[in-house]
Image (spheres, rainbow, N blue to C red):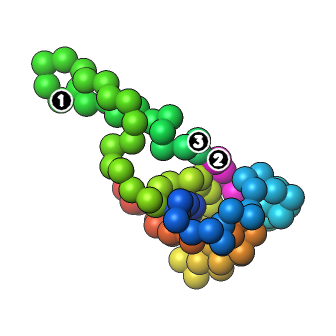
Amino acid sequence: MQYLISVLDDESDESTADAADGSGDVDAFNERLRADGYLVFVAGLDSPATAAVVDNRGDAAIFTDGPYVESKEYLGGLWIVEAPDLDVALKLAAEASRVCNRKLEVRPFVDE
């Protein structure tokens, strides 16, 4: 089963300022995930200010600069892991939360 582990950045949380993206701890964690066969994909995301919203539900596509939702919390990065069950995915997320100094959200992908 595959799980999305979302990194939740919070502009108002000063405790996360010390954790640099791509730090040695995160890199080592990613390498261990890869070596243990859990890692499917990992990436960090740029600031929400770099986002664009695309809406092509009408007669013509509308492109808008900036994030869809203004919020102090935003998606800062993600892991996609392959784990045998939710318990393993949660254990991996707990380790990831420690190394990246962020809150994380874990969600399974829909199995169709």
Q: Are marks 2 and 1 in contact (CB under 8 Å)?
A: no
The residue at which mark 1 appears reads as 57
Seen as rendered, the residue at the extreme left is 59
The residue at which mark 3 appears reads as 46
**In the image, what residue type sits under mark 1?**
Arg
As helix, strand or loop, the secondary structure at mark 2 comes to strand
Q: Which residues are magenta?
A: 37-44
Q: Residues within 10 Å of mark 3 (few under 14, many from 20)?
A: few
In the image, is residue 39 above or below residue 57? below
- How far is mark 3 from mark 1, CA to CA? 26 Å
Tell me where residue 45 appears, x and y as whole percent.
59, 45
Classify the position of the C terminus by image quarter.
bottom left
In the image, is residue 99 above or below residue 50? below
Instruction: Please identify the dominant SS of the magenta region.
Output: strand
Tell me where residue 9 appears, x and y as whole percent.
55, 60
**In the image, what residue type sits under mark 2?**
Ala
Q: Quadrant of residue 85?
A: bottom right
Q: Which mark is residue 43?
A: 2
What's the residue at 40%, 36% (across, down)? 66
Q: Earlier in the sequence, mark 2 or mark 1?
A: 2
Q: Residues within 10 Å of mark 2 (few under 14, many from 20)?
A: few
As helix, strand or loop, the secondary structure at mark 3 comes to loop
45 left or right of 56 in image = right
As helix, strand or loop, the secondary structure at mark 1 comes to loop
- How far is mark 2 from mark 1, CA to CA? 29 Å
104 left or right of 21 in image = left
What's the residue at 62%, 68% (across, down)? 14
- Pick the front one: 5 or 104: 104
Tell me where residue 88 appears, x and y as whole percent.
63, 77
